[in-house]
Amino acid sequence: METVTPRPLPSAAVTSSPPSFAHLLLLTATSVPHLKQLHAHLLRSALDLSLTAPFLSKLLSLSLSSPSSSSSSSSSLDYALSVFLHSPDHLHPHPRLANRVLRAALRAAEPRRALRAYARFRRAGLVPDRFTLPAVLRAAARTGDDAAREAHGLAARLGLDSDPFVQTALVGAHAALGRVADARGVFDRMPQRDLVAWGVMLDGYCQSGRYSEALLLFVEMRSSGIVPDQVILATVLSACGRAKNLMFGKSLHCYILQSDPSIDTHLQSALITVYSNCGSMEIAQKLFDGMCPKNLVASTAMVFGYAKLGQIEIARSIFDQMPNKDLVSWSAMISGYAESDRPSEALKLFNMMQESGLKPDEITMLSVVSACANLGALDQAKWIHIYVNKNGFRTVLSVGNALIDMFSKCGSLAHAQKIFNEMPRRNVITWTSMITGLAMHGDGRSALALFDRMKVEGVEPNSVTFTGLLYACSHAGLVEEGRLVFRSMAQEHNIEPKYEHFGCMVDLLGRARLLEEALQLIESMPLRPNVVVWGSLLGACRVHGEVEIGELAAKRLLELDPRHDGAYVLLSNLYAKAGRWDDVREVRKQMKSRGVLKEKGCSWMELNGKVHEFLMGDVSHPRNDEIYLKLNEVVEELGKMGYSPNVGSALVDLEEEEKRGAVLMHSEKLALSFGLINSARGSVIRIAKNLRVCEDCHSFMKSASKIYEREIVLRDRSRFHRFKDGACSCGEFW
């Protein structure tokens, strides 16, 4: 309470009786400080409470008459509300003043206190009018309070539910509380709908993520003859972008140009966002080039659009030219790097963002955790985990789920399980993330056991859960269990199998050498087989050397995607394994003529917080000489134990000695050599690779783990391999 210097009182007032004194003060008070003096006197003297009602009315009037932006007004309103809320229930100001109190509380961002004041009004017998209920509804919408339903019922009893002002407030409150159907019901019953009512309903759809319905409502609005203003146009453009409805966005763009060719910067930004979200960057760039000055919203939209298309260098160029960057723009660029499979740049940019003084939100952290997961660097993952705990994200469910995925992909199933066990609450994504993590590490039995626990706890699985389960069965060779899981999808959980489920089943049967059954499954699919399904069959044929079915799978795959590099590579490898070198050359010739490039094999590992990358036959590493000396030493030591390079893994038509050299320079062998230089016996070496590990490298890692007494954790494109004491966790089923 502010300090007020008491004013000298007239001698007549001092000698008069207490009621006369109080009445005199009440009549002469012209400011809140004077009224505060009177309030203190009333409390000390226990004067007649009949004075309290006029005192409150005057106090509130003076408090509400000051400009709402001033700090003194805010303090006075706070004081007035406190006095009112602690006064006897039967005392309340005039209804008109009550409405002013509610509106002032809302302007001061005090919706809960507004609802408390309203409750006092009701207990004192106040009958709300058409101005009271909208204020109550706005307060309820902001707090998530169920007072909105009560206010709706009261409006009906008082006959106010047909008042357009109240109806519009009801639409807004129901929509804000997620009850969009109730909002639309009120909206449809409105006999007269002005521009504000249409805008509130459109905004309600957008807030609830029902963007397509917002677009349909806009069409209905235009048909009814209502002319939209710029606020509504911006709302509908946002819905177009979110729904990725480019055609609607273009038609709306034409309408805007016909209505008013001079588009303001707000609408320009909205249009750029639409085209960027829809991937139409040529139009977005043209609009962006014509914008001067370029604002933060438009620039961020351009960064997001180019990053989504994988044109990360253009996105970064625009990002670097932005004079001011907010959290959204930083997050868009970090997410772009993470989704473009450039996790190192994502983490580096995250560090730059922190140096700029900005703190991440949940969306930023999800991108950072995702980048770390793709990098597969355990030390980085541990640092991210510490950062999450220290910065208030520990209890955020989506971040916890992402951490489970991150540690699983970084090779630490123990960390993932610890986070899972300590989470205060779990949803279906939590369980699915843990099941997928177990599957990735080849622990199919544990994944199935966790699924049983999930069902016992009443969590209903979704489509992604079953993808994880089938993946687990596939990588653990659990054929019968996989068949049961696949059947249970539709029979027990009413989930129709999608492409990814058929792909997993084909992979499961293919790995088990049941290639004819896999082909029959594909031919019986209710969906037209896609590249994933045919690719799974082709991959299995390559493993087992089944040329005839493999050729069929490759043919079907290339019919769907003539530039699918994986199809050419797998078919080439299949022919190479069978010694059909003329066919290998023909496949390579087709790749060259169609401009199809094979993805290069790359391995990487983390050392002292830095990620080291290796390509096949790489000579660019600063410690290149040491690495190759160590590799020669390892080959010699393994040779003493009977190791001989499997030249069949070269898959190229070379002389025998050249094949031997090519196999020995695979990127994961170089990474292992570097790891052996920088580690002691009994330690763990962690390597990640972007492609599937070859048979020779698999044997190489097994032998090296025994001779050099290291645990080697290798993450390839499809799963984890843990090599220890000369054995692999995959049980040779990979």
Image (cartoon, rainbow, N blue to C red):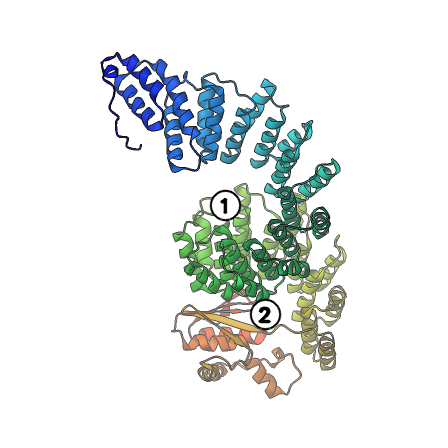
**Residue 579 seen anywhere in this rendered image of the structure:** yes
Dot 1 falls on a residue whose secondary structure is loop
Q: Quadrant of the C terminus?
A: bottom right
Q: Quadrant of the N terminus?
A: top left
Q: Position of residue 627 (x, y in %)?
A: 46, 81
Q: Position of residue 220 (x, y in %)?
A: 73, 38
Q: Amino acid at mark 1?
A: Arg
Q: Is residue 401 left or right of residue 60?
A: right
Q: Position of residue 129 (x, y in %)?
A: 55, 21
Query: Relative to the observer, which residue lies in front, 617 or 451?
Result: 617
Q: Position of residue 6 (x, y in %)?
A: 25, 27
Precedes in sequence: disc 2 or disc 1: 1
Say which residue label 1 marks: 426
Say which residue label 2 marks: 691
Residue at (49% x, 25% y) in the render: 99
Query: Relative to the observer, which residue lies in front, 285 or 421?
Result: 285
User: Eyeballing the image, is 231 above or below 634?
Assistant: above
**Residue 442 seen anywhere in this rendered image of the structure:** no
Residue at (50% x, 60% y) in the render: 323
Q: Quadrant of residue 577?
A: bottom right
Query: Relative to the observer, which residue lies in front, 16 or 59?
Result: 16
Dot 2 falls on a residue whose secondary structure is loop
